Image (cartoon, rainbow, N blue to C red):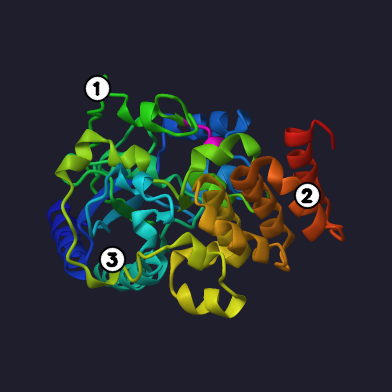
Amino acid sequence: MFVLEKNIKIKNIEEQAYALGFDGFGIASSELGEAGYKFSQWLEMGYSGEMAYMARGEEKRRDPNLVLENIKSIICLRTNYLTKDKGMEFLSFPEKGDVSLYALNKDYHDIITPRLKELEKIIQKEFEGCKTKIYVDTGPILEKPLAERAGLGWIGKHTNLLSEDIGSWYFLSEILVDVALPESEIADNHCGTCRSCIDICPTNAIVAPYVLDAKKCISYLTIELKGVIPVEFRKAIGNRIYGCDDCQIVCPWNSYAVKTDEPDFKAMNSNFLLIDLIQLSDEDFRKRFKGSPIKRIKRRGLLRNVAIALGNSKNPKAVPFLIRALNDKEPLIRAHIVWALGELLLSESVPLLNEKLAEEEDPMVLGEIEAVRERFLGVS
């Protein structure tokens, strides 16, 4: 195929991508270079926590040819989701839960996947007989290093992708193809000596520039971790109940962020009063978060996080609602409510827990009760 003809086809594909709602387009080869080696090092350090799927897909992430046979190129796409400005002011309202900006709207998989499929059809039309595969944050590929190689931005010290023109408030997605396409120019790194993201992290999860220990990251703790949140991180979580945006909020490059006009990314409901949330029934949860990314962590995951936030709220009005929630059917929720009552009632929580949970049998909950007793009475 003549180079000119191929470039014309690529230009048409790029134009169609923007027409579909993508606002960044670039092409990377399937060669990852040093990124694959760094990923393996990251796994060896144990920084992936309980995200076992990371290790299961290690070989594929290091070699995209195992994902799509005879892969030649990867089209990388960017989708801006910023609908409103965000600062650190949420910390001044401990009675409300903070949710990452990306989760205030519809599930991005449901928005981006149909667009990717449309663009995939266009690619297959332009390059008849080619094989393709699409991904939106779900496949075994190293999307940020690929996006960097595709010129969409550089990986910042917080390990998110940064762009000079719109910062970091965007989703990444990819289309793998078995056709060799002209590669984009690799993005330059512009972090310089800045360490704002490292200094702001509440749990010191950025253990070195460009290295994140996911086990400490609040996004991991409130979303990926399915069990008990380690005690040493609970106070640092504050009132964050789904994800954490701190490192992005303070990044100077996000001062250049541009808001999207995409209606599907407009916040559906940003009123997250903690006392209201702790009272959610299964049915209430399903109705409230239908079509939202928050549904991913299920009711038990959200109310676990809400219990932590209430424990950090210093709000005595929360106590009656927490006491009522001690009857919740989910041990995970009851366990974290025990901790929250300990934080709010201090030593007065001990006789209350002895009374209300006298028949408790779940080891997880009993462990939390023992921790409260030991803290205030010096005995377990």
Question: Which residue in the protein does label 1 denote?
Answer: 192
**For residue 214, side relative to residue 199 (left or right):** right
Viewer-side label of 1, 2: 2
Crowd around label 1: few <14 · some 14–19 · many ≥20 (10 Å):
few
> Mark 1 or 2 closer to N-term?
1
Q: Amino acid at mark 2?
A: Pro
How packed mark 3 is, by other alpha carbons closer than 10 Å (few <14, some 14-19, many 20 or more), is some
The residue under label 1 is which amino acid type? Gly
Question: What residue occupies the far top of the structure in this picture?
Answer: 193
Q: Mark 1 falls on what kind of element?
A: loop
Q: Image check: 164 left or right of 72?
A: left
Label 3 sits on what residue type?
Answer: Phe
Q: Quadrant of residue 206?
A: top left
Which label was assigned to residue 88? none
Expressed as whole percent of the image width and height from the top left, the position of residue 272 reads: 42, 63
Is disc 3 in contact with disc 1, using a CB cutoff of under 8 Å? no
Res 83 quadrant in image: bottom left
Magenta region, residue range: 212-216
Read off the residue under disc 2. Answer: 351
The residue singled out by tag 3 in the image is 127
Q: Is residue 363 above or below residue 329?
A: above
Confirm whether residue 290 shows in the render.
no
- Seen from the viewer's position, the closer of residues 146 and 341 is 341
Give the label, 3 or 1, closer to the camera: 1
**Magenta-span inclusion, residue 215:** yes
Whether residue 12 is situated above or below residue 258 in the rendered picture:
below
**Residue 181 colored in magenta in the image:** no
Is residue 45 in view from this perspective? yes
For numbered disc 3, what is the local secondary structure? loop
Q: Position of residue 53 (x, y in %)?
A: 61, 50
Q: Is residue 212 above or below residue 74?
A: above
